Amino acid sequence: MGVLVGRKAPKFTASAVINGEEIVEDFSLDQYLGKKHVILFFYPKDFTFVCPTELHAFQEKLDAFKAKGVEVVAVSTDTEQSHWGWLQMPKSEGGIQGITYPIVADTNKTISTNYDVLAGEYDYNEEGELIASGEMVAYRGLFLIDKEGVVRHQLVNDLPLGRNVDEALRMVDALQFFEAKGEVCPANWSEGKEGMSGTHEGVASYLSKN
């Protein structure tokens, strides 16, 4: 599927751990339609090294996201039981205790496949046996989804490369600025800066001031 920007975010219903402790079987992004923007991010594995730094970084900024009307949701290909177990482990021991946003279990890998962030490849050999090359885990994908369920921004990092949560917040600000004012956001735009109108005159005016 490749680039999802401008398209409806693929729907899913899956098991997830919410509020850091409760397992639900029918978690879906549909609950946010018409109400909230969503940051949906994928990470490779529970009980690893880079992943907890990202999950904790999103938790540290969770109030900032919520203040902007944004829900944060994480996904990996681990089971909901694995998520729950990791959530019971203290941060000092490499765990993610204290994470309160939903963590979805993509155990059949369909969510990662539909968002085109699944690493590894699989096929069938001449004997009809299923074979795979590489680990079938999710790349570090991130998707900003608007209230209508449309993907407005996406970013995919390779497994060793952690993300910048402040950049995710900046993209939320940019989208909401455009939605509110109808002005576009130039290079290195951040909250509080001027936007540009979508005309040659608007561009010229902006450039003359900067």
Image (cartoon, helix red, strand yellow):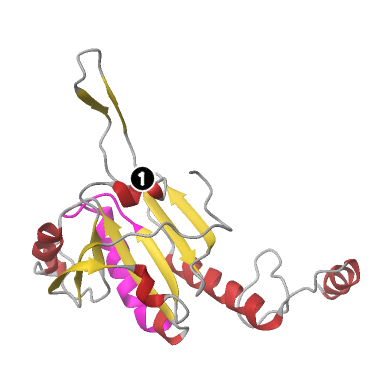
Q: Quadrant of the C terminus?
A: bottom right
Residue 69 vs 44, above or below: the answer is: below
Percent coordinates x, y for residue 187 in the rendering: 69, 63
Percent coordinates x, y for residue 58 in the rendering: 34, 70
Percent coordinates x, y for residue 27 in the rendering: 26, 68
Residue 148 vs residue 146, the one in the foreground: 148
Q: Judging from the image, what secondary structure is the residue with disc 1 in?
A: helix
Tell me the residue that label 1 is attached to: 113
Residue 203 vs residue 49: left or right? Answer: right
Residue 191 vs residue 42, the one in the foreground: 42
Q: Tell me if I can see residue 197 in this picture.
A: yes
The amino acid type of the residue labelled 1 equals: Thr
Q: Which residues are magenta?
A: 42-64
Q: Tell me if I can see residue 160 in this picture.
A: no
Residue extending furthest bottom?
67
Q: Main secondary structure of the magenta part?
A: helix
